[in-house]
Image (cartoon, grey):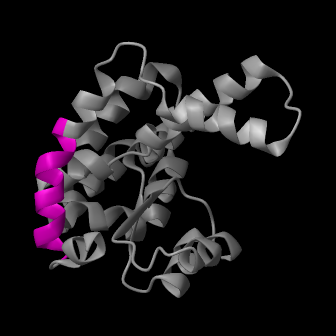
Amino acid sequence: MHILTEIKNRGVNDVLMLVCDGLKGLPDAVETVWPKTIVQTCVVHLLRNSFRYAARQDWDKIAKLLKPVYTAETEDAALERFAEFADTWGKKYPAIVRLWENAWEEFTPFLRFDTEIRRIVCTTNAIESVNARIRRAVKARGHFPNEQAALKCVCMAIMSPDPTGKGQARWTMRWKTALNAFDITFDGRLSAARQ
C-alpha cells in the first residue's frame, strides 16, 4: 500500500490494469489506491505454480488440459474446461484445483479482453526480463561508491539495447494493436492519460 501510494503521489493518477504474480494483499491495496484498476493474475505464473504440485511426467498432460481454460472465449467456457480438468486431475492433484479456484477471481478479467490485449497481459515476463537485466548489471559491478553510481548503472542497464537487437522491435509491434484495443476497452482512459 505504501509503495502504491508513493507511486500515485509521484503522478500516476490512473492504472488501467495491473498484472501480478499472486502477491497476497496486492489486489486490495490496488483497489484502495486506484479503484478502477483491474487486477490480473499472471497466467504463466499460475501455470508454473500448478507444475510445482505435479510430478514431472504429468506436466505435459496438465498443460494440455489447462490451455483450453486460459484460451477460452468466455468465462463460462473457461469454467467448463476447468471442470473437465478438475474431473481428470482433481483426485491426483487437488492442490492444483484449489490453486486455480483461489486465483479464479484475479484470473477471469483476462477472459473478458480481446486477443490483442490477452497476448500482452498474460504474463509479467517482460518486467521480469528487465529485472534480470538490472540484476546482471549490478552483480557484474559488485559495489558502488555512492547512490548516484548505482542509479547510473541501473539506468544504463535499462537503456542499453538488447543483445540481439530484435527485442524492442518485437515488443513495439506487439503493443500497437494492443494499445488500440486498450483504448477502446477502457473507454478512452488511455488517451486521457497521454494528454
Q: Residue at x 30, y 30 (%)?
A: 168
State the image quarter where residue 100 is shown. bottom left
Q: Residue at x 38, y 48 (%)?
A: 43
Q: How many discs appear? A: 0
The spot of residue 122 in percent (x, y) is 32, 48
Of 55 and 1, the residue lying toward us = 1
Res. 68 visible in picture: no
Of 32 and 175, the residue lying toward us = 175
The stretch in magenta equals 173-186
Residue at the far top: name it.
164
The spot of residue 65 in percent (x, y) is 27, 39
**In the image, 35: left or right of 23?**
left
Q: Residue at x 36, y 51 (%)?
A: 86
Judge whether 20 appears above or below 155 on screen: below
**In the image, 126: left or right of 1?**
left
The secondary structure that dominates the magenta segment is: helix
Considering the image in quadrants, where does the N terminus appear? bottom right
State the image quarter where residue 109 is shown. bottom left
